Image (tube, helix red, strand yellow):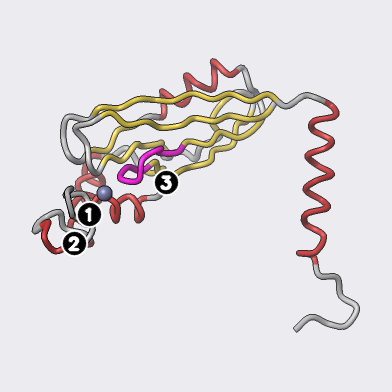
Amino acid sequence: MKAKGERDWRAFQPGILSVMVKQIHKEGFMKSYRKELWFEVPTRRAFINITRDVEACLRESDIREGLVLVNAMHITASVFINDDEPGLHHDYDVWLEKLAPHEPVSQYRHNVGEDNADAHMKRQIMGREVVVAVTNGALDLGPWEQIFYGEFDGRRKKRVLVKIIGE
Ligand code: ZN
């Protein structure tokens, strides 16, 4: 329960946000950058380290301080951050197959004219996007953090969006 006379901070949020946005636009220092990374994975499932690709985008953007958003543009693929260790990637694959096995495809109601219901569920668990801080022109990642594209229904062209904002 809120004590009598206490401010409801939620009521103040929109005002605070709008002031910040106005300042950024007025001073005109915010830059933005957008690029699509394309994939055509030859297998149904794969994990691909895209950290170097995102770093290349950051260099191209010339942004030194800000945020980078990296998101899968497809509902059967993920972008996530974790360790670049093949054993772990194998463990993910086994774990995801236990949670949402591909076969038998007839077990899913979504599989009418397609067979990728499991891929939608795997994407949901592994996530749609990551946001990484940009500090001094570099991705501000933890010591073992790497950015991955997770494919769960490959063998066709798919895209990842990289959006960078900052100064
Ligand atoms: Zn589908």
Type of amino acid under label 3: Arg
Q: Which mark is residue 44?
A: none
Residue sitting at 45 percent across and 38 percent down?
71
Alpha carbon distance from label 1 to label 2? 8 Å
Q: Which mark is in front, 1 or 2?
A: 2
Q: Secondary structure at mark 3?
A: loop
Residue 23 position within the rendered picture, expressed as x and y whole percent measured from the top left: 84, 35
Query: In this view, which residue lies farthest toward the front?
Result: 113
For marks 1 and 2, the one nearer the N-term is 2
Specify whether residue 138 is painted magenta. no
Can you tell which quarter of the image residue 102 is in?
A: bottom left
Type of amino acid under label 1: Asp
Residue that carries the numbered disc 2 in the rendered image: 108
Q: Cβ–Cβ below 8 Å for labels 1 and 2?
A: yes
* Residue 154 shown left or right of residue 74 in the figure: left
Q: Cβ–Cβ below 8 Å for labels 2 and 3?
A: no
Quarter of the figure that contains the N terminus: bottom right
Is 166 located above or below residue 71 in the figure? above
Alpha carbon distance from label 3 to label 1? 15 Å
Type of amino acid under label 2: Tyr
Residue sitting at 84 percent across and 44 percent down?
19
* Residue 143 shown left or right of residue 109 in the figure: right
The magenta region covers: 71-78
Specify whether residue 73 is painted magenta. yes
Residue 12 position within the rendered picture, expressed as x and y whole percent measured from the top left: 82, 60
Q: Secondary structure at mark 1?
A: helix
Residue that carries the numbered disc 1 in the rendered image: 118
In the image shown, does 139 or 109 lie closer to the viewer?
109
Residue that carries the numbered disc 3 in the rendered image: 128
For marks 2 and 3, the one nearer the N-term is 2
